Image (cartoon, helix red, strand yellow):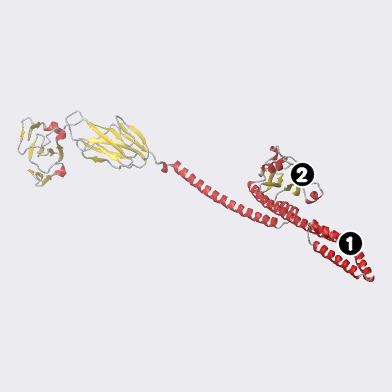
Amino acid sequence: IGTDKGLQIFLKNGKTKLITQKDGLMHSRAENLLLDKHDRMWIGNDVGIACFNMADSSMKYFDEAYGLSIQGFRVSSTWQTSEDEQIWGTENGIQYFFPDKLYNYKADLKVAINRIESRNIFTNLVQSKSYRLAANDNYITFYFSTIEYLPKLRTFYEYKLEGLDEDWIKVANQNSVRYTGLPPGKYSFKVRASNDNKVWTNAENEVLITIAVPFYNSWWFKALAVLTAMLLLWYVFRYYRKKQLERQEELETEVVINYFASQINGRYRSDELLWDVARNLIGKMEFEDCMIYLWNEDKTMLVQKAGYGSKGSMQEIMDKTAYHIPKGKGIVGAAVESKHSVLVNDTSKDKRYFTADGKIMLSELCVPLIHDNEVLGAINTENRRRNFFTAKHQKMLSTIAVLCANQLQRIRAEEEKQQARIEALQNKQKMTESRLQSLRLQMNPHFLFNALNSMQQMILANEEMVATRYLSKFSKLLRTILIHSDKEMVSLKEELEILNL
């Protein structure tokens, strides 16, 4: 019995069975019933036709995909001929078919994946193909379809992306599927189709996809990142270690410079200063040989004033066996002429190098002594090893040379000032002696004795008036001479008056 809730079946054993939409009907209303000669009940409504096989209680559905009316069938508008052909009425006319032929129709179904699209790929497909995609090219759309040459049938699709989907996924009313944000890996896209949702036909081709691992997840990038991090840590460690060493060297340099500054500033004689500097360079900086030179008076020769080490000692210098260097000769002469320090790590390759005693030194460092852009001399140190002197030595020795040159200039200025004082005192003494000598010449003892003796004779001779005039002139002469003795210069008139007196 057809009802608005489905097909009601009454069995011989007294039981009933209800076939509804969930059992295969496209709609629960069963409005037309026709039984074919193979005991298959055809059920029609305004949606389509379904066939219930009593032999196995199976349900099969037919609609416009099988070429039937898209508007369904009218109620009570059916007919069945003696040849078992069925005729069904629709809103647009009649439709007829042989039930057995429609029920057993087998379509030659062919399925194919015919297109793939991604950010960088737009390709039509005719066969299986493999693609290798970049890590960011992971938004992919697959297109598929069936190829049919017989009356149109209803087609069901299922697809599966192996590597991501565990089961087949049904597609409703569409022939494409899109995957977004696929993770790196290998995938195989497959499609199958069916006309009855039971028998499935696999696609003739499949698509293999390999999505690359992002560079930041690749083994080489991770290895490079680890290596970079290690290099960065090593660089940071090396940088701070270098800074620490530089700071330590600066402190050591500062200690040495402060020591030399205190020693240098405490010396007030040139020879004492130079010997002290040479001795301390050997002791504090562990130099093997150290010489200090100053210009001679006409600046044609650099005279060795102090020296310690293999090429000189205080005793040798005092014994007049010092090493003197002509102007412009050797590495010392080059440093003095250029007014810049000269560092030679291998003297065997420097044509300027020479030795006066046959002792070969393979490293040499010379720093000029300069004050107010005037070269006073040079500090020179040598070593038997190649590459002994460093930039640190050069910097420290240059600083010591500046301190030494400044103190030398101060000592010279003080010596010149002291000499000027001595000369002034000597001149003053000479002037005093000259005055005394002049006074003695003018106040000759014989003259004084003769004058006083004459006055005595005049007094004894009772020549009082003559003695008085004589005494008056004598006293005036003495007073004038004594007054003029305090003067550095007198006028010619005053000198004539004295002579007349």
**Secondary structure under the numbered disc 1 in the rendered image:** loop
Q: How many marks?
A: 2
Q: Residue at x 30, y 39 (%)?
A: 161
Instruction: Judge whether residue 481 can be spotted in this image.
Output: yes
According to the picture, the residue beneath numbered tag 1 turns out to be 444
- In the image, residue 174 lies at what x, y percent? 22, 38
At 42% across and 43% down in the image, what residue appears? 216
Screen quadrant of the N terminus: top left
Residue 28, given in percent of the width and then of the height, sits at: 12, 44
Q: Which quadrant holds residue 421?
A: bottom right
Q: Is residue 255 left or right of residue 483?
A: left
Considering the numbered disc 2 on the image, is that residue within a helix, a strand or a loop? loop
- 163 versus 313 height, above or below: above
- Kindly identify which numbered label has been placed on residue 270: none
Identify the image quadrant of residue 160.
top left
Image mark for residue 324:
2
Q: In this rendering, does residue 437 appear at all? A: no
Q: Looking at the picture, which amino acid does disc 1 mark?
A: Asn
- Residue 51 versus residue 473: which sits nearer the camera? 473
Q: Position of residue 152 (x, y in %)?
A: 17, 32
Residue drawn where x is 12% and y is 42% of the image: 27
| Crowdedness near tag 2: few (<14), some (14–19) or many (≥20) residues, C-alpha within 10 Å | some
Q: Position of residue 413 (x, y in %)?
A: 71, 54
